[in-house]
Image: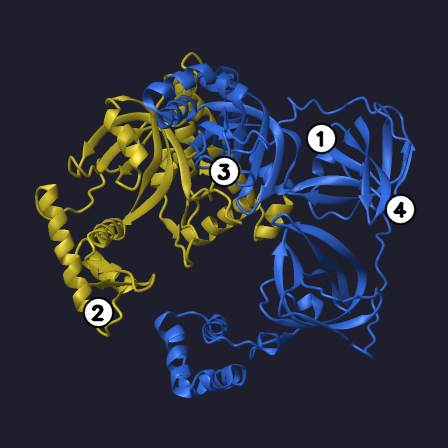
Chain colours: A yellow, B blue
Amino acid sequence: MNARETAWRVFATELNSTTLEIKATEEKQPSYIVTPLGAKINRVLIAGVMTEKENIGSEEEPMWKARIQDVSGSFYVNVGRFQPEASAAIADIEIPSFVAAVGRVRTYTTDDQRVFVSVRPEHIVPIDESVRNEWILETAKSTWKRLKDTKKVLGMGDATEQDLIKAGMSPTEAFGITYALDNYGQMPDSTLYLKTIQAALRMLLPDRNVDLGFPEDYSDEPDEIEIPENGEGSGNNAAQLEDMILRLLEELDTDGKGAPREELERRAEAEGISSIELEEVSNTLMDKGLVYEPNLRYLKRI
Amino acid sequence: MEMEELTPHIQELQRVLGDKIDEEQLKTELNKYLNEYHVNIDAAKRGIIRKYGGTDTATFVTGNSLVKKVSELTGSEQNVDITAKVVFVDNKEITVKGLPKQIISGILADETGSVSFTVWEPGALVLAKGSVYHFRNCYCRTWNDRVQVNLGNRGRVEPADGVKIELPERQITASPTEIKIGKIKEGMGSVTVTGKVISVETREITAKGEQKTVYSGIIADDTGKIQFSAWSDFGLKEGESLCIQNAYIRSWKGIPQLNLGDRCEVSRVDEVTDVVDTSANVKTVDEITRIGGGLDITLEGLVVDVRQGSGIIRRCPQCNRSMLNGACTTHGIVEGVMDLRLKVVIDDGTGAIGAVINKNDTEKLTGVTMQAARGLAAVKGEAVVGREITSKILMKRVKVTGNVMSDDYGPSMIVKSASLEKIDLEGEANKLLDEVEAAI
């Protein structure tokens, strides 16, 4: 089945504490991240206040970087030229304002192996506060469900996916939770998520003195995801990146078949070029007719 | 591929092509197909034979023509031989591109299972039910996850004299599962349901040249509705509550349907008072995906995408289907009738479902009337109408009711009624707070 991927409702705290990724191994197969609470995510639906936006591309080829804040954290949002609709929309959105966005998640790993998750919206639209609050409610409910499910699974001992499906979970949920518990190597930080739910309920019920017993400190998220940039000025930078990639392509093309993608990605990463950037630059180079793909796993300079 | 591996294929091609091509040329050709263009060996051989005019394709058997048992068929076979007994056969006339065409279809079986088959070029072929044949050079396809065996130009059927195939007794399910209508899904065997007849009508159909009356309609219980077809007269009346035993499920495009066949028993029961109120019968997309489809299903979610073909469209005046670039796929270039519709993706956090929304509901949800859309289109073009209604509906919470079916791209709904939804934020938030407080 090629069914469309579900747009998961997750808070920034859960998304940003995600470090697990299931990379696609076959063509057309989507990649996923798996959150500590077992949400197996390809696409998310997020909402909140857009607190900043910046065009780090050029006038002609915008590349927007933005932050959307929910109840206790921020989503990092990137919009490039492969999201034309979102790109056009974000240009017109005022800062700050309420927005909702739906898009795919991407990960980015720093040199010291820290993982950052960003969202590439297909759509980003201005909303009003009530729609934002509905999102908070929905997301709080689904976060709570994942917390409960995780707790239940922890109490079941060595439950298999099949056991969980029998216990009423959907196959996706069962897989996600098992995978998260097996691979994170530690229990999820339930305090973090309960604190987030507390913040959500405080936002929704200002008149009820919501106190689940957690202090209101904010998570220790970074101020900024710095995607490394080489040199100043975007135009320059893009040209430099292109040159570097072209050089790498030549170097890695040992047998005339082109440069193997994996190798290229490794080398590019060593040079401080993220896989996201690599993809963009190689697409630009293909558009310019400087490189082509002899087949999917290779890239070759013309 | 190395040259020695190619030798059998080259020899085979030489047999077919004779002196139409010399060996060197053949090697060069094959090498080009395989190593320059990376096509697979079967396609390469087919291509070469076509190119050099192999006339004798009927006897052409590729190196890897397989012999398989029915249960081994995967549906992707290009060339397979099967020896099996014909357990059902029907000579049919179908219409292909407006011309009548004779085909033979039926079911063949061996010890391992049964599969439906179609002979597309039967000529003078006559198949007898109960006889065993060699079905040669068949190709397989899957439809609805079931394998189908096809015999095309290259296919041959030969009587398998002396071959005996003992078929296992067909297992008759001893006790059909008693089930709620809302839980019925594709691929279930016999079922027993209790429900109320919502509607019933009779239709005259012609099956195998015989006039037959079918009684069809809708039956419902407190969990859902389902379409039924009764193949004999059970005296069904609207409003009656029935217990239907031993009915079987067949699906059409993922929508399960209840069939009352020969083995079915119908009895009158005390009134089923709770008949599903579809507006209250809200299902999640995950639940719908697992069932596959159904009638009058309601769901709630956010519109997360608006697809191509939303806005002003034109429909063929003859068949009412939407047209593409001024032409109807069946009736060619016609003067289309303007219509307004939305094709959206609705996501409720458990899954995503496609939904097609008609003019009235599109007007209701977006506030853009047909008249306004026409006006806007006249001034700014029809593309602007699409963008306008997209901006009005994206990220809106909607509640939709309609019939759901499924295909490879997941479930989709033809929406019968739609409305914008609001959540009782405070009530729901309080409920969640109480639950969380009680649990920690």
Question: Can marks 2 and 1 be said to lie on one chain?
Answer: no
Q: Residue at x 17, y 66 (%)?
A: A250
Tell me the SS state at disc 3: helix
Where does label 3 land, which residue?
A: A146
Chain ID, mark 1: B
Tell me the SS state at disc 4: loop
Chain ID, mark 3: A
What's the residue type where badge 3 is placed?
Arg
Q: Look at discs 3 and 1 and give the one toward the viewer.
A: 1
What's the residue type where badge 4 is placed?
Arg
Where does label 2 land, which residue?
A: A253
Q: Position of residue A134 (x, y in %)?
A: 44, 22
What's the residue type where badge 2 is placed?
Asp
The reply to whether discs 1 and 4 touch (Cβ–Cβ < 8 Å) is no
Q: Look at discs 2 and 1 and give the one toward the viewer.
A: 2
Question: Can marks 2 and 3 be said to lie on one chain?
Answer: yes
- Mark 2 to mark 4 CA distance (whole Å): 69 Å
- Mark 4 to mark 3 CA distance (whole Å): 46 Å
- Mark 1 to mark 4 CA distance (whole Å): 24 Å
Where does label 4 land, which residue?
A: B263
Where does label 1 land, which residue?
A: B224
Asked if one can make out residue B440 in the rendered structure from this viewpoint, the answer is no
The reply to whether discs 2 and 4 touch (Cβ–Cβ < 8 Å) is no
Q: Badge 2 local density, few (<14 within 10 Å), some, or many (20+)? A: some
Q: Is residue A257 left or right of residue A26?
A: left
Between A299 and B310, the one lying in front of the other is B310
- Mark 3 to mark 1 CA distance (whole Å): 29 Å
